[in-house]
Image: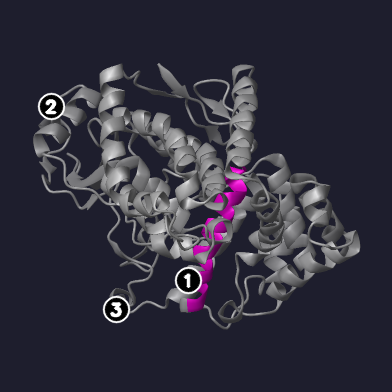
């Protein structure tokens, strides 16, 4: 079996920081040569067709724009669907990693898919739950209320009258994902000359964290435990506006998740919110506070707070749904985030700690290539973060608080890479990959990708958008007392 074991998991059910249930290992199916060859040929046809004009111009030695391969890559992702669409979504939310032009191109890469025939849905439900569908749900809508690349969601009713949402894993998706994860790395390496080593390098690095994300999403028991854990956390803090749907364990399994149905509209549906006659400002403020409470106190957070996953309910609360992606900060990343907030709140010593942390991550050589002394490096970081304490959402980039300093160092790192030939870069990637594989074989993570920090930057981009919509005259750290108190709190058990 091809096992994808997320970082830090040593048992099928383990507890992490603050009692957080770590994901179970994911066993993707072993693929025979026929299955892998079929997906490889399909992938080669799609990529070849979309990149044909670029290949032709390369053969004729014609000049090409620096990022001519971005659009063909996006079109290929959309045609291949499933795994590639989800990967494209990560690119769309990562302007600090790939540049705004790449992020903008991939924002059209929507995580959507066709409905699944109802007889297949019935088969999955009955196989996972061990009894006929009608014995579980007296009412079950054959048409989905949502259809994404990996799962579909149907509305149903339990025998006690509770309305539920039933999330079902797409049939056959595990084999497709297993094949795609095997093929992505060689494809990105081969395309390095067409899309540029500056884009191919981050793609390969992002792929490391993406493996972990997909591994967790393919087993709905992970999502169920996450929802139960965060519901318990919310019960211990007074945030009455925030609601997480209740999952029903007796009607859930690896491929199916039955949960409380929440009736509402997405947070960016301004006309729908107006019909509810509810003031969204205090609700949005409370959701942001809830996110920071779990992040600062426990180092875990909802990893995909796009508008579709934050729903304003008819009763004036905010429903936080779709817990398939959850960020877990490493001890170093968790401490880094605390330092950032401490610094923004006026702790002078925290600035130097932040600078030292970034120097350790990127290496002295990369920092020196910026042409800054240690004190100038600290000042640069301070200039990017400190204004966020007083400036309102409408005037700042919230993601800068965590990603801004790293973007500067990333640019310096990219500059060093650009001085190497494509062959040298590819050879370096392969050598690094060999080292990671050896580390993974001997119990290490096999990856240097900091998925937690990456997901934080992604969520802050979402919160920045909501802040500009509803709280444009308020800064993130407007409530200094809340954040000072938060830094003193123990993890929520």
| Quadrant in which residue 456 is drawn | bottom right
Q: CA separation, marks 3 and 1?
A: 15 Å
Question: Mark 3 against mark 2, which lies toward the viewer?
Answer: 3
Q: Position of residue 27 (x, y in %)?
A: 40, 22
Q: Position of residue 21 (x, y in %)?
A: 53, 33
In this rendering, position of residue 49 left or right of residue 338: left
Question: For the stretch drawn in magenta, what is the main secondary structure?
Answer: helix
In this rendering, position of residue 107 left or right of residue 255: right
Q: CA separation, marks 1 and 2?
A: 43 Å
Q: Between residues 160 and 123, which one lies in front from this camera angle?
A: 123
Query: Residue 271 — which label?
Result: 3
Q: CA separation, marks 3 and 2?
A: 41 Å
Mark 2 Cα within 10 Å, few/some/many (few <14, many 20+)?
A: few
Quadrant location, the N terminus:
top left
Report the residue at 59% width, 23% height from top.
437
- Residue wearing tag 2: 132
Question: Mark 1 against mark 2, which lies toward the viewer?
Answer: 1
* Position of 49 relative to 468 (above/below): above
Helix, strand or loop at label 3? It is helix
Q: Position of residue 429 (x, y in %)?
A: 60, 36
Magenta-drawn stretch contains 226: no
- Residue wearing tag 1: 466
Give the residues drawn in magenta, as a range. Answer: 449-468
Report the residue at 83% width, 48% height from top.
364
* Position of 154 relative to 35 (above/below): below
Report the residue at 61% width, 76% height from top.
396
């Amino acid at each position: 079996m091809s096992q994808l074991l997320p970082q830090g998991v040593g048992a099928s059910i383990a507890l992490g920081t603050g009692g957080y249930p770590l994901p179970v290992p994911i066993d993707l199916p072993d693929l025979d040569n026929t299955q892998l060859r079929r997906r490889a040929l399909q992938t080669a046809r799609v990529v070849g067709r979309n990149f044909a004009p670029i290949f032709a111009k390369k053969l004729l030695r014609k000049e090409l724009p620096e990022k001519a391969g971005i659009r063909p890559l996006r079109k290929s992702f959309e045609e291949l669907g499933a795994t590639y669409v989800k990967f494209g979504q990560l690119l769309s939310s990562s302007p600090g990693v790939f540049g705004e032009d790449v992020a903008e191109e991939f924002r059209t890469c929507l995580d959507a898919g066709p409905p699944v025939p109802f007889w297949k849905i019935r088969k999955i439900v009955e196989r996972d739950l061990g009894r006929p569908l009608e014995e579980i749900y007296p009412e079950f809508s054959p048409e989905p209320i949502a259809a994404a690349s990996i799962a579909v969601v149907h509305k149903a009713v339990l025998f006690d009258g509770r309305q539920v949402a039933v999330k079902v894993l797409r049939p056959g998706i595990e084999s497709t994902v297993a094949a795609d994860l095997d093929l992505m790395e060689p494809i990105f390496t081969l395309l390095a000359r067409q899309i540029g080593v500056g884009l191919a390098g981050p793609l390969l690095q992002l792929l490391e964290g993406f493996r972990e994300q997909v591994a967790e999403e393919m087993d709905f028991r992970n999502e169920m435990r996450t929802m139960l854990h965060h519901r318990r956390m919310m019960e211990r803090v007074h945030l009455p506006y925030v609601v997480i749907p209740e999952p029903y364990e007796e009607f859930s399994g690896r491929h199916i998740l039955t949960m409380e149905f929440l009736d509402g509209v997405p947070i960016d549906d301004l006309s729908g919110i107006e019909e509810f006659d509810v003031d969204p400002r205090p609700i949005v403020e409370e959701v942001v506070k809830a996110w920071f409470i779990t992040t600062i106190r426990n180092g875990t957070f909802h990893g995909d707070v796009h508008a579709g996953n934050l729903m304003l309910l008819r009763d004036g609360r905010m429903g936080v749904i779709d817990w398939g992606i959850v960020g877990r900060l490493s001890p170093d990343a968790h401490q880094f985030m605390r330092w950032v907030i401490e610094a923004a709140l006026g702790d002078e010593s925290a600035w130097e700690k932040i600078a030292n942390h970034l120097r350790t991550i990127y290496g002295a050589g990369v920092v020196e290539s910026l042409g800054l002394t240690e004190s100038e490096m600290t000042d640069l970081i301070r200039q990017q973060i400190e204004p966020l304490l007083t400036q309102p959402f409408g005037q700042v980039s919230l993601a800068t608080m965590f990603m801004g300093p790293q973007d500067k160092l990333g640019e310096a790192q990219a500059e060093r890479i650009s001085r190497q030939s494509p062959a040298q870069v590819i050879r370096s990637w392969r050598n690094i990959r060999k080292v990671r594989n050896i580390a993974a074989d001997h119990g290490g993570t096999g990856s240097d990708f900091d998925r937690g920090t990456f997901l934080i930057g992604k969520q802050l981009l979402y919160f920045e958008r909501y802040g500009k919509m509803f709280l444009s005259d308020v800064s993130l750290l407007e409530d200094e007392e809340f954040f000072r108190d938060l830094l003193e709190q123990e993890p929520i058990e």
